[in-house]
Image: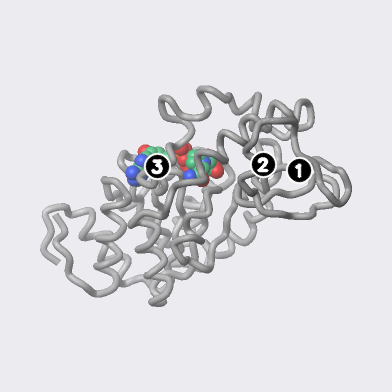
């Protein structure tokens, strides 16, 4: 492939040659859908510090207050649509070119794009779960209205989004690690690789001899990764076209 950006050509070659590709996505893949990551300037953590709003202790101490954060988050996740990066990954799965997506995102955009084999390691904000009886229900628009924290119609327990808060265990980690151990290429897209335990997955892939590709607007510093700089909405469809056997203009 002729290419003036050697890293994207190298990444395309790795993806084309791989036997089993697992994708690991973070907040960056959804930025072009209009969902800012939390930690940049103006991000949600500025107004809702995680220690006050995103821990399991905070939820139990003051559920009404933490629900202000859940509602703000829910309003931000209601409108966005999958972008070309989500859609390209869904097409690759349909064509049998990628095996699974492990995502830290709670926005449901991989599902909405049509991907099927998804491990949502931090859960999903599209569903609520009762803290007492574990009954689930959709996070419908009515729950965005201001008011006290909602309770379960069945048992009266506290309802909360089915996401992993700080201080809670990441139960899907075993599934994620199993997928990563089985792949020979881990394709990382839009994650700072700072939030553990998920941030340990690239190192797990490397120790198993797999190649790690890192698509990000800046270096996330994953050791040994083939780094592809640029916005995911542009780099991912171009790489996907290369994997599918097309010859897009890669520059
Ligand atoms: P992060 O905020 O720590 O890092 C985002 C990364 O994306 C950064 O490295 C940034 O350089 C990169 N990035 C930004 N725009 C990009 C683009 N257009 N293309 C490619 N890369 C881009 O995100 P994280 O590592 O996922 O961890 C944050 C935690 O917050 C996660 O655990 C997640 O649960 C949660 N979160 C989820 C969402 C969501 O569901 N959309 C949004 C924000 C935060």
Image coordinates for residue 82, horizontal then vertical, percent:
41, 55
Q: Earlier in the sequence, mark 1 or mark 3?
A: 3
Circle 2 SS class: helix
Residue position marked by numbered label 1 in the rendering: 159
Residue position marked by numbered label 2 in the rendering: 143
Label 2, label 1: how many angstroms apart (C-alpha)?
A: 10 Å
Q: Residues within 10 Å of mark 3 (few under 14, many from 20)?
A: some
Q: Is any atom of residue 195 visible in this view?
A: no
Q: Are discs 2 and 3 less than 8 Å apart at CB?
A: no
Q: What quarter of the picture does the N terminus occupy? A: bottom left
x 71%, y 30%: residue: 147
Q: Are discs 1 and 3 less than 8 Å apart at CB?
A: no
Q: Are discs 2 and 1 less than 8 Å apart at CB?
A: yes
Q: Residues within 10 Å of mark 2 (few under 14, many from 20)?
A: some
Q: Earlier in the sequence, mark 2 or mark 1?
A: 2
Residue position marked by numbered label 3 in the rendering: 34
**In this rendering, would 221 be left or right of 165?**
left
């Amino acid at each position: 492939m002729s290419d003036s950006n050697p890293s994207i050509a190298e990444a395309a070659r790795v993806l084309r040659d791989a036997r089993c590709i697992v994708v690991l996505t973070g907040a960056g893949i959804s930025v072009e859908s209009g969902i800012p990551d939390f930690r940049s300037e103006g991000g949600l953590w500025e107004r809702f510090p995680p220690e006050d709003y995103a821990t399991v202790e905070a939820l139990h101490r003051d559920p009404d207050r933490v629900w202000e954060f859940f509602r703000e988050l829910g309003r931000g996740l209601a409108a966005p649509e999958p972008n070309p990066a989500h859609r390209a990954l869904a097409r690759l799965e349909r064509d049998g070119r990628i095996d699974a997506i492990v995502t830290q995102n709670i926005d449901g955009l991989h599902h909405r794009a049509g991907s099927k084999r998804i491990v949502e390691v931090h859960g999903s904000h599209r569903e609520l779960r009762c803290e007492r009886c574990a009954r689930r229900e959709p996070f419908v628009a009515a729950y965005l209205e201001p008011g006290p924290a909602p309770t379960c119609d069945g048992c009266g327990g506290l309802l909360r989004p089915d996401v992993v808060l700080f201080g809670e265990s990441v139960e899907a980690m075993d599934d994620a690690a199993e997928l990563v151990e089985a792949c020979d290429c881990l394709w990382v897209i839009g994650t700072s690789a700072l939030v553990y335990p998920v941030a340990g997955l690239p190192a797990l892939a490397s120790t198993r001899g797999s190649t790690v590709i890192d698509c990000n607007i800046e270096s996330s510093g994953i050791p040994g990764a083939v780094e592809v700089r640029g916005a995911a909405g542009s780099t991912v469809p171009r790489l996907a076209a290369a994997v599918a056997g097309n010859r897009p203009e890669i520059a």
